[in-house]
Amino acid sequence: IRPRSGWFDLRIGELWRYRDLIWLFVWRDFVKVYKQTILGPLWYLLQPLLTTIMFTVIFGRIARISTDGVPHILFYMSGTVVWSYFANCLTSTSDTFIENAPIFSKVYFPRLTVPISIAISNLIGFTLQFLFFLIFLCYYSFKGVPISLTGWIVYTPLLVIQMAAL
């Protein structure tokens, strides 16, 4: 064990050597969340759908807030999917070191493996929810709703990495 030389000494090579441990932590987090639920991983799709429906009813129908021609479901689902990934990463990693204190005190491994595994396990849910959003987007575009796709899709992986890093 060597002392750190600076704030940005992340030792990526060491993280690469412990990639199997990262995948074991990802699997542990996935099983921990959905092991005893009735619907299991179907919650990945139901959660943003129910939240989107609630926002659509409250803000779109009752409050009549304009979305500038974008269908309410697409507008609110895009925000819900992105925000849920960021919020899940933030809340899950905030108590990482407290939850895993027994593991940290027993054996050496790079401490950054646990937050990275949490971001990856949340990325699984985000990917499913984002694909679900793209299905709705394709449905509305085939239906004839004028939806203009700009270059945002190219920057999506960079934005997801930035959200996970934050």
Image: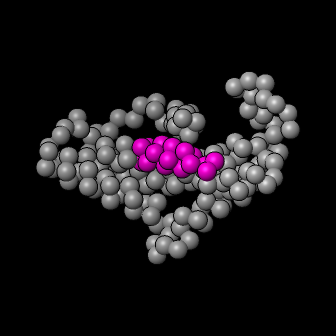
Residue 132's spot in the image, x, y percent? 43, 55
Q: Is residue 132 above or below residue 1?
A: below
Residue 93's spot in the image, x, y percent? 57, 46
Residue 79 visible in the snapshot: yes
Using residue 22 as the reference point, say whether residue 137 is left or right of it.
left
Q: Give the residues in magenta.
A: 81-98
Residue 22's spot in the image, x, y percent? 72, 51
The residue drawn where x is 74% and y is 24% is 6
Nearest to the observer: residue 115 or residue 16: 115
Is residue 36 within the magenta segment?
no
The residue drawn where x is 40% and y is 35% is 149
Nearest to the observer: residue 54 or residue 5: 5
The residue drawn where x is 67% and y is 48% is 114
The residue drawn where x is 46% and y is 30% is 151
Q: Is residue 157 above or below residue 144?
A: above
Residue 152's spot in the image, x, y percent? 46, 32
- Residue most toward the top? 6
Taken as a whole, is the magenta stretch helix, strand or loop? helix
Nearest to the observer: residue 74 or residue 38: 38
Residue 23 visible in the snapshot: no
